Amino acid sequence: MPEEEGDVYHTEISLSGQMKVDSTGGNMEEQAEVETAENPFEPLVESILQQLEDQDPVFLIGLIVALAVVVITCVFLKYFLSSKTVRSAVLLVGLCDSGKTLLFSRLLSGKFKRTQTSITDSSAPYKAKNDKANTWTLIDLPGHDSLRPQYLEKFKSAARAIVFVVDSAIFQKEVRDVAEFLYILLTDTVISRNAPALLVACNKQDITMAKSAKLIQQQLEKEMNTLRVTRSAALSSQDGSVGGSVYLGKKGKDFDFSQLPMKVEFLECSARGSKGEDGDADLVNLEKSLAKL
Ligand SMILES: Nc1nc2c(ncn2[C@@H]2O[C@H](COP(=O)(O)OP(=O)(O)OP(=O)(O)O)[C@@H](O)[C@H]2O)c(=O)[nH]1
Ligand SMILES: [Mg+2]
């Protein structure tokens, strides 16, 4: 023990000696002592190097290759495990009465169904109309204001695509509400990070007054540009369940949908169809887009 204490004392002296050397610019003996004190592992390292030098070079190469294989496997596993999450849900979202539940029924069975406002979610496997016949889980979410946030929270991380359903016939009246809902969705951190495809389904095209997909896109861009200024700070604190904390689009530029991290498509459809309840729906564009996911 006393010997160890002596060593410690010696090191301290040496270190202060180093400072002295720096300030006075002199004493070589003290500097040598500092170097010995700073490399306590030097003998150990030297002996290991010596032992390695004595080894067969084939053994050394084998050791290096084995180490490299271990490192590459670790990196590969990390990458593979983190990118494995396959999102397979296609969410039907939108304001009340936009036609989500009828679309859900038409996409799954082709049949017309009388609907009532949804109070819970429903889901079913949907087979995409493509060569691979991919199967996605189609989920119909309630559109009511009071239910929307909790259902969105529940399913947003599983979304491969979001079908945002708009009632094109009364769009003019609802433009502000539609834009606000879309703003909440697109500024959500999870949605922005996962970037599921966004298909804006401009529904109810069978009605004569229905607005075109192009006009709906333009008006939404205008409205969301205004919202971005007025509500960017307020939304996240008001609606705690859906965190709107990502900046929408590009700073310093008027908002347009091409600035978003996800693929965005505006398309026209009619869940009712031009021939009414007995006829087929007009979902060709929507089905085409779902086939490309
Ligand atoms: N004319 C016409 N009516 C439609 C169309 N799609 C849906 N509807 C009607 O719109 C009404 C509302 O449809 P839903 O599918 O229940 O609407 P929703 O979006 O599920 O509404 P919530 O469940 O309240 O969020 C129903 O009377 C439908 O028949 C369409 O393409 N054209
Ligand atoms: Mg519904």
Image: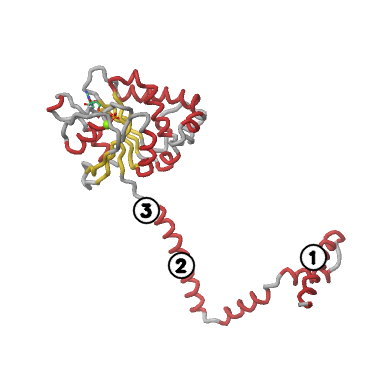
Q: As displayed, is residue 33 above or below residue 248? A: below
Q: Earlier in the sequence, mark 3 or mark 1?
A: 1
Q: Which residue bears the numbered disc 2?
A: 70
Query: Helix or strand or loop: what does disc 3 sit on?
Result: loop
Label 3–label 2 contact, CB within 8 A:
no
Taking depth in this image into account, of 153 and 162 the one nearest to the observer is 153
Helix, strand or loop status at disc 2: helix
Q: Earlier in the sequence, mark 2 or mark 1?
A: 1
Disc 2 beta carbon < 8 A from ligand 2? no
| N-term mark: 3 or 2 | 2
Q: Which residue is mark 1?
A: 15
Give left or right: position of 88 versus 58.
left
Ligand 2 falls in which quarter? top left
Q: Secondary structure at mark 1?
A: helix
Of residue 147 and residue 201, the one placed in the foreground of this image is: 147
Residue 47 spot, x, y in % from top left: 63, 79
- Between the residue at mark 2 and the residue at mark 1, the CA separation in whole angstroms equals 41 Å
The structure residue drawn at horizontal position 75% and vertical position 70%, both measured from the top left corner, is: 37
